[in-house]
């Protein structure tokens, strides 16, 4: 068996970001489109400054600051500047006057401050009485305060988050190059598996991996193109792998990865010309995970128990897919946590314990940790990394992996 770090390192070393594709940003974020994460395949610079011009930060009056600082100043009001297009030949603001202005509207020539409407009032003759003087440049947003034209606003590997989309669109960017999303074919093996909603014969169970894994893998930027269940049969296994290799860049198998008579995926893959890079990892759950490749098709084999499949997917498959999807940091997200309850791992393999981490970083194991106990997975939002032969007390600092 190899260590988890060695397995992850070998897996990621053999993967590179997919080629870029140019996409229309508006189409990419249109209602009803996929929300799977995408990652930049180019450096983008701002074509314009943000803001592109000096503008008012408040509703009020554009003024010369010095005109508001005399005793009981009253200014003559002329004109109004709303947000939106304005004439290029605007007349400079004369001394002793004010122009009504609204948030986001350009500052007129000659003005050097904006008097908030709460700090002034109109007298019966229409003059503007200043109640609280302003300083030069008060309540003005300057051109380039946020972003200057030519500044980097997106780096290779950056995720195209909602916040970054807002920034790109504010800069007027129409298209963006993103790494092509990896396609995935899921194959679950088990003659005992039945779909929900059908009768359950004796000795059978309902299939519960494919839906969870589809949602999980797409959260890493993958595009799941097929998900099938096959019986424990050599011919069916070879046919499913062969079909999947024509459909997808990555084949993820579920079950059939161990050493039993009905664990058929590795032998079928070898018959089809796949090389197996490694098999079996010194961790719990997930010991029988394997990784292989044929040309540009990648094969990742998960154990069949739903808990083991999910945890191993978090620890190994998601990083692989993020690497292909172009993420700059493909490794699992982790953070420190503080044990709220004792955890013991008397075994010789590292144990990734299902747990819940709260807003105070307190970590609570979610129940029985056997690989068939789905209820403890459903209650978890993290895996706690517990070394072999360890007994940790409440208050111990632990590494927590989230998804």
Image (cartoon, rainbow, N blue to C red):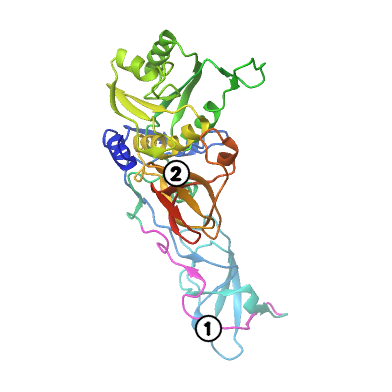
- 397 horizontally vs 198: left or right: left
Give the residues in magenta: 125-148
Instruction: Find residue 200 and report its horizontal and vertical position in percent.
Output: 65, 17
Classify 10 Å Cα crowding around label 2: few (below 14), some (14-19), many (20 and above): many
Query: Mark 1 or mark 2, which is nearer to you?
Result: 2
Which of the 4 quarters of the picture holds residue 54? bottom left
Residue highlighted by disc 2: 352
Q: Residue furthest bottom?
A: 71
Image quadrant where one finds the N terminus: top left
- In the image, is residue 191 part of the stretch drawn in magenta? no
Question: Element under label 2?
Answer: strand
Look at the image and tell me whether residue 220 can be seen.
Answer: no
- 95 horizontally vs 194: left or right: left
Identified at 59% across, 80% down, the residue is: 75
* Residue 215 drawn above or below residue 50: above
Q: Main secondary structure of the magenta part?
A: loop
Identified at 41% across, 8% down, the residue is: 235
Classify 10 Å Cα crowding around label 1: few (below 14), some (14-19), many (20 and above): some
Residue highlighted by disc 1: 67
Numbered badge on residue 401:
none
* Residue 283 drawn above or below residue 302: below
Instruction: Find residue 250 and report its horizontal and vertical position in percent.
Output: 38, 26
Instruction: Find residue 317 and report its horizontal and vertical position in percent.
Output: 40, 34
Q: How much space separates mark 1 and mark 2, taking CA atoms? A: 69 Å
């Amino acid at each position: 068996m190899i260590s988890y770090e060695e397995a992850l390192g070998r897996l990621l070393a053999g993967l590179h970001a997919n080629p870029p594709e140019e996409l229309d940003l508006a189409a990419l974020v249109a209602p009803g489109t996929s929300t799977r994460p995408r990652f930049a395949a180019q450096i983008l610079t701002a074509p314009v400054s943000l803001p592109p011009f000096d503008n008012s930060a408040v509703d009020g009056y554009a003024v010369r600051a010095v005109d508001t600082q005399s005793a009981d100043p009253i200014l003559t009001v002329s004109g109004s500047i709303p947000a939106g297009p304005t004439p290029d030949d605007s007349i400079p603001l004369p001394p002793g006057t004010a122009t009504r202005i609204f948030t986001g509207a350009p500052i007129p020539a000659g003005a050097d401050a904006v008097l908030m409407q709460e700090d002034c009032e109109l007298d019966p003759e229409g003059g503007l009485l200043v109640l609280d003087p302003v300083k030069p440049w008060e309540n003005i947003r300057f051109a380039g305060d946020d972003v200057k034209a030519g500044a980097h606003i997106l780096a290779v590997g950056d995720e195209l988050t909602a916040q970054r989309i807002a920034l790109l669109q504010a800069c007027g960017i129409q298209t963006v190059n993103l790494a092509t999303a990896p396609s995935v074919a899921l194959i679950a093996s088990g003659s005992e598996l039945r779909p929900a909603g059908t009768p359950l014969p004796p000795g059978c169970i309902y299939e519960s991996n494919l839906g969870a894994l589809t949602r999980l893998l797409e959260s890493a930027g993958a595009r799941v193109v097929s998900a099938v269940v096959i019986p424990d049969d050599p011919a069916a296994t070879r046919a499913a792998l062969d079909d999947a290799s024509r459909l997808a860049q990555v084949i993820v198998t579920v079950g059939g990865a161990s050493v039993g008579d009905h664990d058929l995926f590795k032998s079928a893959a070898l018959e089809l010309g796949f090389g197996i890079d490694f098999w079996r990892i010194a961790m719990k759950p997930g010991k029988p995970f394997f990784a292989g490749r044929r040309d540009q098709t990648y094969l990742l084999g998960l154990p069949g128990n739903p808990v083991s499949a999910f945890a191993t997917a978090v620890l190994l498959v998601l990083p692989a897919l993020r690497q292909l999807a172009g993420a700059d940091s493909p490794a699992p997200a982790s953070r420190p946590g503080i044990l709220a309850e004792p955890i013991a791992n008397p075994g010789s393999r590292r144990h990734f314990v299902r747990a819940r981490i709260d807003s105070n970083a307190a970590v609570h194991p979610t129940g029985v940790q056997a690989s068939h106990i789905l209820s403890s997975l459903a209650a978890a939002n993290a895996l706690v990394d517990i070394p072999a032969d360890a007994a940790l007390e409440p208050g111990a600092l632990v590494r927590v992996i989230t998804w």
